[in-house]
Amino acid sequence: MALHPITEAIRIRTEQTQEMEHSSPLFLTSSFCFDNSEDMRAAFADETDDNIYSRFSNPNVKEFTDRVCVLEGAEAGFATASGMSAVFASFMTFLKKGDHLVSCNSIFGSTHTVITKYLPKYGIDYTYVPANSPEQWERAIRPDTKMIYLETPTNPGLDIIDLEFAGRLSRKHKLILNVDNCFATPVNQKPIQYGADLVLHSATKWMDGQGRVLGGVIVGKQELIREIYLFCRSTGPSLSPFNAWVLSRSLETLDVRMERHASNALYIAQRLENHPKLSWLKYPYLASHPQHSLALRQMKNGGGIFCFELKGGLQSGRKFLDHLNLLSVTANLGDTRSIASHPASTTHAKLTEEERAAVNITPGLIRISAGLEFRDDILNDILQALEKC
Ligand SMILES: Cc1ncc(COP(=O)(O)O)c(C=O)c1O
């Protein structure tokens, strides 16, 4: 009988050495040896899949990537040094001068910088389409469009994009559908089931889950991943074996962690929803979320993030951060420890108010990454900070 992907991902491991170790050893090596020149020639000629050099492949990196492939239902994958190197490699491998990208407008800040500042330098054009009105997406597709890019749920606004719709649209126009699945994780949502060709992650977030290492991964169709591998093998954004070892161990607990992150987030969001200091609160598994039924359809749970808007705007946002005692004020998410962030005064402070509005960053927006602490302790810290802003 076939094993469940969660079981399979836990049990996949590097080949056991003669030491008969239970946990995978760390292959902290830059290169690999050959018995003779013929074996080395054959490896370089791609006649064998022997490891050559850790910029190309490494047993720890392979273990991590194979586990993500099983969880996402993907044919193949390649792991990168960070989520941003996964995003950049997925663009640079498939887009060239004269090509056009259709991207959802609600995306992670650095991805926005890559699309608007760097892709145009290489002659790659883009059109942003609104996350919450998919009827506008087809109109943005042009004869030179090659790829559709999206995140769902979006960061930080938590809009939900219909993956079935995106899959149908990309198939109809023969485009590569490229999905950043970082916020949901593969134990919650599997974009490949809906027709995504590429799925990528910042493994730095929930996959690590303890805020220790940077990492990224791209999985998808074999022939596309082969192209990504060739691009990365030459340009060098490969994941370090040490980080892969850490991330791979973390994947073994991803499913149980995400269930608790999501139940904590739902519990706290329900209790804050009607708080008088908030103009709104968004969480995909609350009935008040504008795309609640879509979230129920394509996500197994609501995820570990919720966000809200403080009625007092920018100044209240800063005061809220200053009065937190338990929650961490730090530029990350997806940790065992709960984290609060205020994008308008931090990550998006350099943008004008109009630019922030264009990427759905409102002045009083607070994003909470629900950790694994006892849920009432997280809630009580947020409540006491709200009293002071
Ligand atoms: C949705 C999303 N994609 C990509 C990234 C970039 O990942 P990294 O920081 O690992 O480069 C982030 C980082 O926060 C993110 O939230």
Image (cartoon, grey):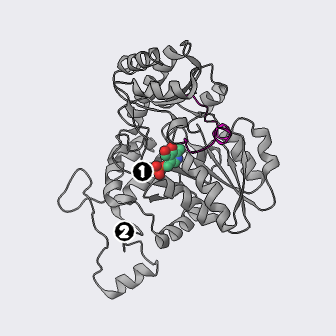
Q: Name the amino acid, label 2.
A: Ser
Q: Is residue 320 above or below residue 356?
A: above
> What secondary structure is the magenta-colored segment mainly?
loop
Residue 217, horizontal then vertical, whole percent: 47, 54
- In the depicted view, which residue is nearer to us: 5 or 3? 5
Q: Is mark 2 within 8 Å of ligand 1?
A: no
Q: Please name the residue shown 34% across and 21% down the image.
A: 374
Residues tagged 2 and 1 counted as in contact (Cβ below 8 A): no
> On screen, 319 above or below 229?
above
| Mark 1 Cβ and ligand 1 under 8 Å apart | no
| Residue range highlighted in magenta | 348-364
Q: Is residue 73 magenta?
A: no
Residue toward you, 165 or 383? 383
Whichever of callouts 2 and 1 sits on the residue coming sooner in the sequence is 2
Viewer can see residue 75? no
Q: Which residue is mark 2?
A: 54
| Image coordinates for residue 120, horizontal then vertical, percent | 67, 62
Could you say where residue 154 lies in the image, as x and y percent from the top left?
Answer: 59, 38
Q: Mark 2 and mark 1: span between their CA atoms?
A: 18 Å
Check disc 1 and report the residue beneath it. Answer: 67
Q: Position of residue 13 (x, y in %)?
A: 33, 54
SS for callout 1: helix
Does residue 362 show up magenta in the picture? Answer: yes
Q: Amino acid at mark 1?
A: Arg
Which residue occupies the foreground of this view, 185 or 270?
270
Q: Quadrant of residue 117?
A: bottom right
